[in-house]
Image (cartoon, helix red, strand yellow):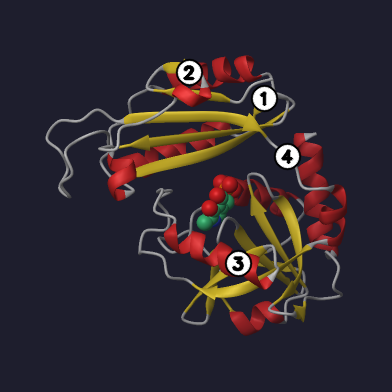
Amino acid sequence: MPDIAFINGRFLPWQDATVSIDDRGFQFGDAVYEVIRTYRGAPFEVGAHLDRLDRSATQLSIPQPYTRRQWVQWIQHGLSLAGYQDAKIYIQLTRGVAPRDHTFPSESRPTVVMTIRALHPLSPETRRSGVTACTCEDLRWGRCDIKSVNLLANVLAREEARKAGVFEAILVRDGFVMEGAVSNVMAVQGGVIITAPESPRILSGVTRTVVLQLAREEEVIVDERFLSIDSLYQADEVFLTGTTLEVLGVVQIDGKLIGSGRPGPITQALAARWALLTG
Ligand code: PLP
């Protein structure tokens, strides 16, 4: 089964899928993106992802080239070509090709890139034992709510995590936890889930929204506020949420054990609810 590439309304062999060096996505990071996954061949929360793509594009005045219906058709077509049960769909929308100049071009057509690749899920053992993390200073810009391809600060944080031999980098601003480099971060203290509120400081994850809904259905109180780094270290449980991570326990941060050093009961309950929802 092949990985699938799509550019501006055409499915292409991977090696032929190229964009111009004048593309503003390449020149300026002037682009937004989405990552959607499938479960048993069906895209999960596709409406929420396409809503967020619209929101991100609108915030940057990048025109949306396709209707919702067209997007869903392109995605379905690509999935049928790829044939993967567990696929990762990557969509990028740039402001298009124009001679290099910072100001918006008077004329340009957005570039649309989509790829569909096999998704390799985390091992059940990693999910059972949980992962480790380090904290890093959050060097990102002031509009982290826009899912833009300007990911240099995230890249540097992930590299710091890799060098530290841990799974995720938790981004901290002025002593408070924002989110992970590729995930949202939730802590549990006294049975209450605490997570950063939706704001320009974080990307509001599609998984975050669904997990908080599941938590409320389980009658777990959710407190959306910024948590200090010291409170994070002292939390009973910490977990990450994200499209490919789902609900993933964090058992050690900066070398300090979180709770019992195993994913805690609320993390496990939400991971089980997630598995039921998507299985
Ligand atoms: N926060 C950041 C910075 C991310 O990059 C991501 C995912 O890529 C998330 C949160 C989680 O978002 P979602 O649940 O929509 O995948």
Q: Which residue is mark 4?
A: 120
- Please state which amino acid type lies under the numbered disc 4: His
- Marks 2 & 3, CB-CB < 8 Å contact: no
Seen in the picture, residue 82 relative to 237 is either above or below; the reply is above
| SS for callout 3 | strand
Distance from disc 3 to disc 4, alpha carbons, whole Å, reads 21 Å
Quadrant of the rendered image containing residue 195: bottom right
Residue placed furthest toward the front: 15
Q: Which mark is residue 42?
A: 1
Earlier in the chain: of badge 4 and badge 1, it is 1
Say which residue label 3 marks: 169
- Looking at marks 1 and 2 on the same chain, the residue that comes earlier in the sequence is marked by 2
Q: Is mark 2 within 8 Å of ligand 1?
A: no
Given contact means CB atoms under 8 Å apart, are the residues at marks 1 and 2 in contact? no
C-alpha separation, residue under disc 2 versus residue under disc 4? 23 Å
Instruction: Out of 208 and 175, give the one closest to the viewer.
Output: 175
Circles 2 and 4: CB atoms closer than 8 Å? no
Q: Specify whether 253 is left or right of 128.
A: left
Q: Amino acid at mark 1?
A: Ala
Q: Tell me which amino acid carries mark 3.
A: Ala
Whether residue 133 is situated above or below residue 68 in the rendered picture: below
- Quote the CA–CA distance across marks 1 and 3: 30 Å
